[in-house]
């Protein structure tokens, strides 16, 4: 299957505009739509769903911790039961709103700190997976492609859920296969490195880590960001590269 492009969208709220969703949507395959906890609101969700439908883009829920002030980038301690509930609340909201437009939510990609916590904490990951397994119908879960992908796939299979593994075009990888912390220099790639990494993932199924090692990454989908005009142009270039 060719590498898909996914993007986090619907992250505006009220009069505050974030991202360039209308410019991004024609160039991606999957829209990860914020569900109101870290960003977004009912009107933004509705409009983003409509835009995705117009461009025949797959729809995914993008739930996070309840943290509007911190944009969902701060870890919040929750019991497994609380994680399942906050996931179901957000996923159900997007799923229901999609149905009113004749659209179908197909997958879930946790946001920010919840995503990061899921990748390093087995208890959080199990709670997230349990929320997908217990949802009212089958949907896929998106998580980071790492050297432990086989183990993560086995965890998912035990619960009867399917995974989409994700890589990042604009993030530097640490030697262990995780994303380099944003607090460290070089964590976010500039345009040239971003395009090189996208090409390497497409052609070799690999990335070059922060210390120069070649790391194999088996990814189904590539995350891109279109928060500004330069980002949108980069997405267009990556789209052209993937389609070559």
Image: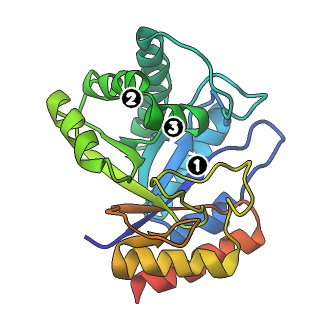
Q: Residues within 10 Å of mark 3 (few under 14, many from 20)?
A: many
Residue at horizontal 28 percent and vertical 45 percent from the top: 163
Q: Which residue is mark 1?
A: 48
Counting from the top left corner in percent of width and height, residue 213 is at 47, 70
Q: Is residue 106 visible?
A: no
Residue at horizontal 62 percent and vertical 19 percent from the top: 76
Nearest to N terminus: mark 3 or mark 1: 1
Local SS, label 1:
helix
In the displayed structure, would residue 78 be above or below residue 6? above
Residue at horizontal 35 percent and vertical 62 percent from the top: 219
Q: Nearer the viewer, residue 6 or 170?
A: 170
**Viewer-nearest of discs 1 and 2:** 2
Local SS, label 2:
helix
Q: Nearer the viewer, residue 120 or 31?
A: 120
In the displayed structure, would residue 113 be above or below residue 220? above
Q: Which residue is mark 3?
A: 115
Q: Nearer the viewer, residue 203 or 213?
A: 213
Alpha carbon separation for disc pair 3 and 1? 22 Å
Q: How many numbered marks have been drawn onto this rendered protein structure?
A: 3
Left/right placement of residue 244 relative to residue 13 reads left
**Residue lying furthest right in this view?**
15
Residue at horizontal 52 percent and vertical 75 percent from the top: 197
Local SS, label 3:
helix
Q: In terms of image quadrants, where is residue 66?
A: top right
Q: Which residue is mark 2?
A: 125
Nearest to N terminus: mark 1 or mark 2: 1
Q: Is residue 140 visible?
A: yes
Alpha carbon separation for disc pair 1 and 2? 28 Å
Counting from the top left corner in percent of width and height, residue 187 is at 67, 59
Counting from the top left corner in percent of width and height, residue 80 is at 42, 13
Alpha carbon separation for disc pair 2 and 3? 9 Å
Q: Residues within 10 Å of mark 2 (few under 14, many from 20)?
A: many
């Amino acid at each position: 299957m060719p590498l898909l492009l996914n993007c986090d969208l619907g992250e505006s709220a009220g009069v505050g505009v974030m991202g360039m969703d209308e410019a991004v949507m024609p160039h991606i395959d999957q829209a990860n739509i914020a569900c109101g906890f870290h960003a977004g609101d009912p009107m933004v969700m509705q409009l983003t769903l409509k835009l995705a439908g117009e461009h025949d883009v797959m729809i995914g829920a993008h739930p996070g911790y309840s943290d509007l002030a911190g944009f969902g980038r701060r870890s919040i301690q929750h019991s497994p039961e609380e994680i399942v509930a906050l996931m179901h609340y957000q996923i159900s909201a997007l799923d229901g709103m999609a149905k009113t437009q004749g659209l179908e939510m197909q997958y879930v990609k946790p946001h920010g700190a919840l995503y990061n916590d899921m990748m390093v904490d087995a208890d959080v990951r199990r709670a997230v997976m349990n929320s997908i397994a217990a949802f009212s119908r089958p949907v896929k879960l998106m998580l980071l492609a790492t050297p432990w992908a086989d183990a993560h796939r086995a965890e998912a299979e035990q619960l009867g859920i399917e995974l989409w593994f994700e890589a990042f075009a604009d993030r530097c990888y640490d030697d262990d296969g995780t994303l380099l912390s944003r607090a460290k220099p070089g964590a976010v790639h500039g345009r040239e490195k971003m395009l090189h990494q996208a090409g390497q993932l497409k052609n070799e199924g690999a990335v070059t880590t922060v210390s120069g090692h070649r790391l194999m990454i088996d990814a189904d989908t590539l995350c891109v960001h279109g928060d500004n005009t330069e980002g949108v142009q980069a997405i267009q270039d990556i789209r052209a590269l993937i389609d070559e």
